[in-house]
Image (cartoon, helix red, strand yellow):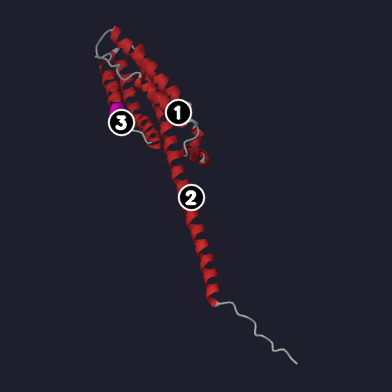
């Protein structure tokens, strides 16, 4: 007696379609997540680039203005002083980098950035420098004392900025690390701001 052969069972089409849809969905989600991570990395990189650029610019400001302050303090003639003051004033074109660096640090930490206070500080410095030595003869004791204190303050601020690793501007990995809060740049910002705060009340009257 022969046994009837049973026809092979067919897998439901709905199951196959479901599997295809799940695979497509999984691939799509993986792609979107990959894009999401890539966008985050790019934003971190851009932050690191801005921070590095501002750190380099801030150092350029201090390195440009400090020699002119020394020349001004040693000057014996009005023309010589005016030249030093002109060059010092030109160096202040880079002072926005100091502001930018500190702004990035506060934004990263989610703390308030006292931009008005810093602007007032650097404006007061420029106004005081404009008053120094605008006369014949030797600098007054008050002018010399102000220049000495300003040189000391700016030297301390430069010292803080110089601790920054400027290689980050040419390195994507270092820039991303900075964007993630590493490489000590936040501590540098704290020291820079503290050095500025210690000198905010110094001006030539």
Discs 2, 1 touching: Cβ within 8 Å: no
Pointer 1: what residue? 187
Pointer 2: what residue? 37
Majority SS type along the magenta span: helix
Q: Which of 26 and 47 is in front in this view?
A: 26
Alpha-carbon span between mark 2 and mark 1: 27 Å
Q: What stretch is highlighted in magenta?
A: 113-118
Image spot of residue 64 (x, y percent):
39, 24
Q: Does the magenta stretch include residue 114?
A: yes
Pointer 3: what residue? 115
Q: Nearer the viewer, residue 165 or 86?
A: 165
Tell me if mark 2 has few (under 14), some (14-19) or many (20+) residues whose alpha carbon lies within 10 angstroms of its own: few
Q: Could you say which quadrant of the image residue 62 lies in?
A: top left
Q: Which residue is drawn at 40% across and 25% down?
A: 192
Alpha-carbon span between mark 3 and mark 2: 32 Å
Q: Could you say which quadrant of the image residue 55 lies in?
A: top left
């Amino acid at each position: 007696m022969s046994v009837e052969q049973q026809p092979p069972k067919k897998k439901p089409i709905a199951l196959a379609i479901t599997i295809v849809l799940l695979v497509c969905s999984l691939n799509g989600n993986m792609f979107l997540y990959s894009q999401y991570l890539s966008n985050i990395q790019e934003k971190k990189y851009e932050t690191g680039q801005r921070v590095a650029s501002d750190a380099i610019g801030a150092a350029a400001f201090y390195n440009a203005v400090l020699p002119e302050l020394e020349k001004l303090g040693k000057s014996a003639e009005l023309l010589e002083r005016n030249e030093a003051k002109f060059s010092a004033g030109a160096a202040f074109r880079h002072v926005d980098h100091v502001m930018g660096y500190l702004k990035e640090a506060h934004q990263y930490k989610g703390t308030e950035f006292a931009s008005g206070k810093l602007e007032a500080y650097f404006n007061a410095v420029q106004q005081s420098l404009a008053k120094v030595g605008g006369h014949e003869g030797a600098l007054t004791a008050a002018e010399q004392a102000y220049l000495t204190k300003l040189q000391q303050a700016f030297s301390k601020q430069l010292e803080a900025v110089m601790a920054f690793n400027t290689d980050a501007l040419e390195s994507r990995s270092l820039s991303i690390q900075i964007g993630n809060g590493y490489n000590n740049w936040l501590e540098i910002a704290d020291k820079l701001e503290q050095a500025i705060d210690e000198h905010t009340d110094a001006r030539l009257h």
